[in-house]
């Protein structure tokens, strides 16, 4: 295991990486996804709850559906906001850091893959890679999650369109027909949920892993927005983001 870098730090630079809107988006998204997964499981396979009261008085399924739909709206509008912030936010939130459009992006993805996944050494020593924001591999995976967000929104609101009286869900009424009916649309919606579960497990593991190995405040940065980078490393890699950028970029 790589030794903690913060044991050898003499001078740190505090770097403001995650802006407040990005942090709010992150935690709202996390809460919405947890609510959607729990209620989605119940809706797809409700528990047999025994009670002397009439089912119409229990309203258990109704509450689960209400929470599911409320979380879906939060998820949807939060996603729309993040699309907007990808154009107006700082360099670490910009879409250039998520979509591979340069040779440098793919080279960094391969470098991160060798270090994080294969754990290859160079000259018998652990390799290191610094990206102040997302590294290229993380950025590309987040790009895939944004595509999964889009699929969930399309299929979810597509299924809800026939039951809703509001104009917004009805905009998605064409989706089930595109997928050949409600049954397959529901299957896609369900499979996409498992993608989010798998992503969440890997995401949490890697955040704790990098926080432990690098000691740069990976976990706390999503609370306060700041990371703590060795001054020498920051000066050397200050422009080391997945896609090339000018010195005076945000």
Image (tube, grey):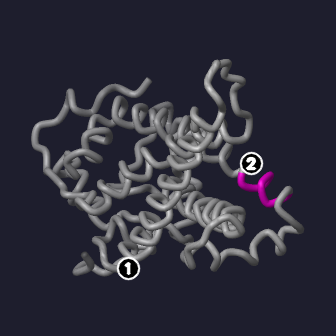
* Point 28% across, 63% down: residue: 21
The residue sitting at 28% across, 71% down in the picture is 90
* Mark toward the viewer: 2 or 1: 2
User: In the displayed structure, would residue 62 be above or below residue 87?
Assistant: above
**Horizontal side of residue 85 vs 36, given as left or right:** left
Q: Answer with mark 2 or mark 1, whichever residue precedes in sequence.
A: 1
Q: Which mark is residue 87?
A: 1
What segment carries the magenta color?
184-189
The residue that mark 2 highlights is 191
Which of the two residues, 19 or 215, is positioned nearer the viewer here? 19
- In the picture, the quarter occupied by the N terminus is top left
Q: For residue 47, which quarter of the picture?
A: top right
Quadrant that contains the C terminus: bottom left
Against 63, residue 237 (above or below) is below
| Residue 159 drawn above or below residue 222 | below
**Badge 2 density bin: few <14, some 14–19, many ≥20, Cα 10 Å:** few
Report, in whole angstroms, how far the alpha carbon at label 2 lies from the one at label 1: 30 Å
């Amino acid at each position: 295991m790589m030794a903690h870098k913060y044991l050898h730090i003499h001078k740190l630079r505090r770097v403001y990486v995650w802006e407040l809107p990005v942090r709010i988006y992150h935690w709202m998204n996390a809460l919405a996804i947890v609510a959607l997964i729990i209620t989605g499981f119940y809706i797809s396979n409700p528990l047999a709850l025994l009670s002397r009261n009439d089912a119409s008085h229990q309203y258990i399924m109704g509450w689960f559906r209400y929470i599911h739909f409320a979380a879906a709206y939060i998820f949807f509008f939060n996603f729309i906001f993040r699309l907007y912030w990808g154009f107006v936010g700082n360099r670490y939130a910009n879409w250039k850091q998520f979509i591979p459009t340069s040779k440098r992006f793919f080279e960094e993805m391969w470098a991160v893959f060798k270090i994080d996944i294969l754990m290859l050494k160079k000259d018998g020593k652990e390799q290191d890679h610094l990206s102040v924001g997302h590294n290229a591999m993380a950025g590309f995976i987040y790009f895939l999650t944004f595509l999964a967000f889009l699929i969930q929104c399309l299929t979810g609101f597509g299924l809800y369109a026939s039951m809703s009286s509001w104009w917004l869900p009805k905009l998605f009424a064409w989706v089930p027909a595109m997928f050949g009916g409600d049954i397959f649309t529901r299957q896609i919606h369900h499979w996409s949920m498992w993608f989010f579960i798998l992503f969440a497990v890997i995401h949490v593991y890697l955040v704790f892993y990098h926080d432990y190995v690098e000691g740069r405040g990976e976990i706390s940065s999503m609370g306060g927005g700041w990371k703590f980078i060795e001054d020498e490393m920051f000066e050397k890699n200050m422009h080391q983001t997945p896609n090339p950028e000018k010195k005076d970029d945000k």
